[in-house]
Image (cartoon, rainbow, N blue to C red):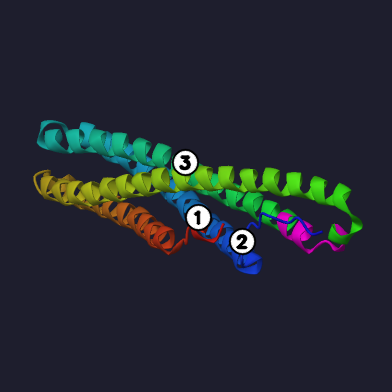
Amino acid sequence: MNTRLHKPSEKPAAALAEAAHVAAVAARIAGELYRASQIARRLALVAQNSRTMALRVGEQAAGLDVLSEYFADLSRDTIRLSGEVNLLATRIAGTSVAYWRVLRYLQALEESPRWNDGPGFQAFAGQELNRAAAGAQEQQLHFSEARKVLARRLDELDTYMRSARTLAVNFRLEATKTGTHEAVLRNLAADLDGLSAQIGEHAQRSIVLLQEMRSFDAVA
């Protein structure tokens, strides 16, 4: 008698495709945030250069000194946050791969010709099905939590970059008060704005990718 009582999915092929999709999207997000972290390092360098220039100009650039220091803090936070997001995306990719492997194992058990071998194999396979299904549920929980945290971190990074671009405008306005140093400082302001915009683009693309990432909760 066939005693198969638990199936991981009515559509195992769809579940496997879903897990593969999640892994691919998470890997793309990780790539976006790796590039964002590299740009954030350049942003930190520009912030340091702008502070050096502000100190050289003196009292005329008091406002620029404050803005430069804030940019330096912001770039450090961006590097940290980008690293966290990259790690979360990598973890989601790993979770989805683990989930995919569990599904493959369950599928192999479900399709095994040995179900007709008798109660011995049926008992073993039934235990394995339940154990693997429990593992799949655990991976789903890990995925769900990591996805929520990733969404919050991406929103935080996007907010950082919006603030950074506003600060770059203020930096450019302050630069007009520095006389002969204005051209150099305006160029630095343009660099701060441009780099912040690039990081923001990576954050926005990651947010869109995350929204497209179909949860595999629905196919387990």
Residue at 68% over, 46% down:
130
Residue at 11% over, 50% down:
173
CA gap between label 3 and label 2 equals: 35 Å
Residue 198 screen position, x and y as percent: 36, 57
Q: Quadrant of the C terminus?
A: bottom right
Whether residue 40 is visible, yes or no, is no
**Residue type pointed to by label 1:** Asp
Q: Is residue 33 above or below residue 21?
A: above
Give the foreground label among 3 and 2. 2
Using a 10 Å C-alpha cutoff, classify the residue at mark 3 as few (fewer than 14 neighbours), some (14 to 19) or many (20 or more).
some
Q: Are marks 3 and 2 in contact (CB under 8 Å)?
A: no
Using a 10 Å C-alpha cutoff, classify the residue at mark 1 as few (fewer than 14 neighbours), some (14 to 19) or many (20 or more).
some
User: Which of these two is toward me, 65 or 85?
Assistant: 85
**Which secondary structure type mostly characterizes the magenta part of the structure?**
helix
Q: Which residue is mark 1?
A: 217
Q: Which residues are magenta?
A: 106-114
Query: Was residue 189 drawn as part of the magenta stretch in this picture?
Result: no
CA gap between label 1 and label 3 equals: 26 Å
**Residue type pointed to by label 3:** Gly
Look at the numbered disc 2 and give the secondary structure of its residue.
loop
Look at the numbered disc 3 and give the secondary structure of its residue.
helix
Q: Which residue is mark 2?
A: 9
Comes first in the chain, label 3 or label 2: 2
Count the numbered circles shown.
Answer: 3
CA gap between label 2 and label 1 equals: 11 Å
Horizontally, residue 194 falls left or right of residue 145, namely left
Numbered tag placed on residue 83 in the rendering: 3
User: Which of these two is toward me, 84 or 141?
Assistant: 141
Residue 37 screen position, x and y as percent: 44, 46
Whether residue 38 is visible, yes or no, is yes
Horizontally, residue 109 falls left or right of residue 32, namely right
